[in-house]
Amino acid sequence: MNWSVILGISKTHLLSRKKQSSIAALGVTFGIGTFITLASFMTGLNGLLDGLILNRTPHIHLYNEIAPSEQQPIDLAAEFAEGFNLIRSVKPKQSQVRLHNALPILGQLRDNPEVRGAIPQVQAQVFYLAGSIKLNGLVFGGDIMEEVRLFNMSDYIVEGDAQSLARNSNGIILGAGVADKMSLKVGDRIQISSVNGGLFPLKIVGLYQSGLADIDNVQSYVNLSTAQRILGEGKNYISDINVKLFDMELAPGMAKELARQFDLTAVDIKTANAQFEAGTDIRNLITYAVSVTLLIVAGFGIYNILNMMIYEKMNDIAILKATGFSGTDVKMIFISQAILIGTIGGALGLFIGYLLSKGIEQIPFETDALPTIKTMPVNHDPNFYIIGIVFALLATFFAGYLPASKAKKIDPVDIIRGQ
């Protein structure tokens, strides 16, 4: 089999039908280009939505949950051991919000090679005071620089910076919703009142905006020592521990182990965001289903064009076979035509898909709910380009294989006699 001759004939056939060849290549081009554009934009949008929730959610959250005791006194009575005991109006057990031995637990977590970081946290119910205005709020105390490292906190600080809070023991990063309601800005002072009645003047060193109004209207951040002081507790008071892992998939198993080991409530990220993840999976499924459908439609277009090309080339096939070309040679001529169409159309499709993706990325996308996002989100994943060119070659190969198999079986005598 002389490949130079076969490729030369294939090239001649394609150039002799430039319009049909161009339409076939454009079918591949727009199929691949649309696939890359759609997949890049939709997965970029999904990544943005996921980031709003997952970036700020610990992989494992450790705390003391106030709940009824799992074992009631009647369960310990021997005379009722074999019976079915029904208890009404069960009250929560007496328990503390603070974590017992929190500092040793933190040390053990940070020594774990699977743990990227563990942050102690204190939550304090407060009132924001400014003149006669009084708003309910929730203040989180923690290590702000660790929050930046592990939870991308800096992406949500729209004014000021995290370093200012780390340097100021009486500073606060105020929720943007609270600041709007109370007409406050960075540099102003705000009075914080604890549920016990204590007053704490704090300087606003930054504004925090998560994009979720219910959070921004109540939530603010202070240093760990400041939150402990607001609650009137000592330096060893910790109410929560947020854990970030190197591999999020390990979170469910490790949460169960930590809950058993430390006798605490441990909620993993998959349990906490089960409904959100289900929505993400559905959006991704729709994205890939539509994208693959576009590629399949392009493949059928190529098949139809090559099929018609073979019927138009009956005389050429008869002459080729009459001059010594075997059926396999003829088959490879048409398959090579399909591969050439797929290669040229696929390469153009990758280029067009990249240009369209970059164009979408330049479209302004500004909203008060997402202050750190300035343009449309696009995911430039190289895998999309690899999938696109591989599918283009496979689709054109199979689209050309069936017509080429018919060409292989054509009897040149029947064609010449018919002429």
Image (cartoon, rainbow, N blue to C red):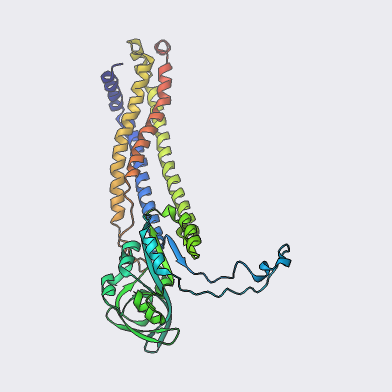
State whether residue 116 appears in this view: no
Residue 158: x, y in percent? Answer: 30, 70
Residue 161 horizontal side relative to residue 311, left or right:
left
User: Which residue is depicted at the point 41% across and 35% down?
Assistant: 299
User: Observer-nearest residue: 67 or 324?
Assistant: 67
Residue at the extreme bottom: 132
Splitting the image into 4 quarters, where does residue 70 fall?
A: bottom right
Residue at the extreme front: 78
Residue 211: x, y in percent? Answer: 38, 67
Image quadrant holding the N terminus, namely top left
User: Observer-nearest residue: 86 or 312?
Assistant: 86
Q: Please tell me whether residue 390 is drawn above or below residue 149 in the rendered image.
A: above
User: Which residue is depicted at the point 36% across and 25% down?
Assistant: 335
User: Which residue is depicted at the point 37% across and 31% down?
Assistant: 396
Q: Please tell me whether residue 384 is drawn above or below residue 60 in the rendered image.
A: above
Residue 22: x, y in percent? Answer: 31, 34
